Image: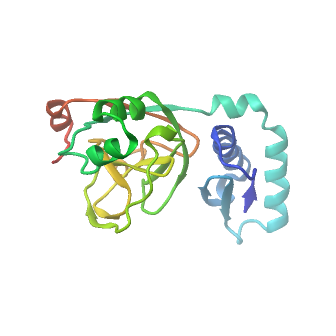
Amino acid sequence: MLYLGRAPGPALAARVQAACRAVEQVLGADLIDLVPSYTSVLIIYDPLRSDHWSVLRRVRRALRQMGDAQCSDSVRTVVLPVYYAPEAGADLEALAARAGLSVQQVIDLHSATSYRVYAIGFAPGFAYLGPVDERIAAPRLATPRPRVPRGAVAIADRQTAVYPAVSPGGWNLIGRCPTRMFDPHAEPIMPVGVGDEVRFEPIDRERFLALGGEL
């Protein structure tokens, strides 16, 4: 396990992403998988090809050579379309009322922010994004829904996410995204990775359906 810091944030997320690329290069065929998270990277290597000390030595060398420029250069911006509406986001009106804002103000605040991908978990393609503007931050639902639709855009505390598949969930739903967040038959299988920057672009109902969205 490679620990790169303690407090999650955009700069650390970029460093995690840059570290993954550096480790991939130095370990090559010895590497089985990398699992990045908020402040760390799990390195899974082939013990039949290499040993702990060899991996440690190469990873340390890669980190020494990794400068701040590489961290900033690794940031990629991904734009995801979102249909914001009560029919697409069951909690949109309630969240707006609780925040003392109009529905349009919630949409404007959510789509005006650039979010960093801090981690991918819970389900394949479920990217934890943040930070959400504190004016629209909202606690998780007291009782999770047994079925959240694929593509649901949601807020929990100061994080936001897109549900990649139908699943249970307790986040506040505010819209829906037609982009598939996980497709094992696509290349790449996910449109975002840890360290990437994500922006949400409001679209209308017609555009949402034309892009393959489902209501």
| Colouring method of the image | rainbow
Q: Residue at x 71, y 71 (%)?
A: 47
Residue 5 percent location from the top left of the image: 75, 50
Please tell me whether residue 93 is drawn above or below residue 36 in the rendered image: above
Name the residue at the front extreme.
Answer: 100
Residue 153 percent location from the top left of the image: 34, 46
Residue 54 percent location from the top left of the image: 83, 61
Name the residue at the bottom extreme.
Answer: 48
Q: Is residue 194 visible?
A: yes
Residue 56 percent location from the top left of the image: 82, 59
Relative side of 165 to 196, left or right: left
Q: Nearer the viewer, residue 41 or 173?
A: 173
Q: Residue at x 79, y 68 (%)?
A: 51
Q: Is residue 183 visible?
A: no
Please tell me whether residue 210 is drawn above or below residue 171 in the rendered image: above
Task: Name which quarter of the figure residue 97 lies in.
Answer: top left
Relative side of 99 to 28, left or right: left
Q: Nearer the viewer, residue 144 or 21?
A: 144
Name the image quarter holding the N terminus.
Answer: bottom right
Q: Nearer the viewer, residue 11 or 87?
A: 87
